[in-house]
Image (cartoon, grey):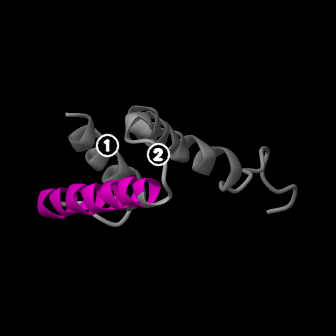
């Protein structure tokens, strides 16, 4: 259940601006699942204990949930208030 949720979250966060119709959003969930399982495999190859996978999956989901906040906080253009003084 957690792997499916993580796949949907990762796919939605990474590809939400690119994919707008339903079929492409399903494709983004598949791409999110591939990314999720790649991260799991890298961690297992590094020699971490498989019992730590619950902690890892929670961290991966938390990082991808925080990406939209980081984007809105640090990568938006500042809006000038007041407009121009001459028209």
Identified at 46% across, 33% down, the residue is: 55
Farthest right residue? 85
Identified at 44% across, 42% down, the residue is: 49
Q: Secondary structure under badge 2? A: helix
Q: Which residue is mark 1?
A: 6
Closer to us: 55 or 66:
55
Contact? badges 1 and 2 (CB < 8 Å): yes
Closer to us: 32 or 48:
48
Rate crowding at label 1 as few (under 14), some (14 to 19) or many (20 or more) other CA atoms within 10 Å: many
Q: Is 47 positioned to the left or the right of 3 in the image?
A: right
Identified at 79% across, 63% down, the residue is: 87
Where residue 29 appears, x then y in whole percent?
Answer: 23, 55
Q: Is residue 33 magenta?
A: yes
Where residue 83 appears, x then y in whole percent?
Answer: 78, 52
Q: Which residue is mark 2?
A: 64
Where residue 17 appears, x then y in whole percent?
Answer: 38, 61
Magenta range is: 22-44
Quadrant where the N terminus is found in the figure: top left
Closer to us: 66 or 72:
66
Q: Is residue 82 above or below residue 54?
A: below
């Amino acid at each position: 259940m957690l792997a499916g949720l993580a796949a949907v979250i990762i796919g939605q966060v990474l590809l939400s601006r690119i994919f707008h119709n339903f079929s492409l959003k399903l494709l983004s969930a598949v791409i999110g699942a591939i990314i999720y399982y790649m991260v799991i495999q890298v961690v297992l190859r590094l020699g971490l204990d498989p019992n730590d996978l619950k902690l890892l999956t929670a961290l991966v989901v938390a990082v991808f949930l925080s990406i939209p906040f980081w984007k809105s906080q640090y990568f938006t253009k500042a809006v000038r208030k007041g407009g121009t003084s001459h028209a």
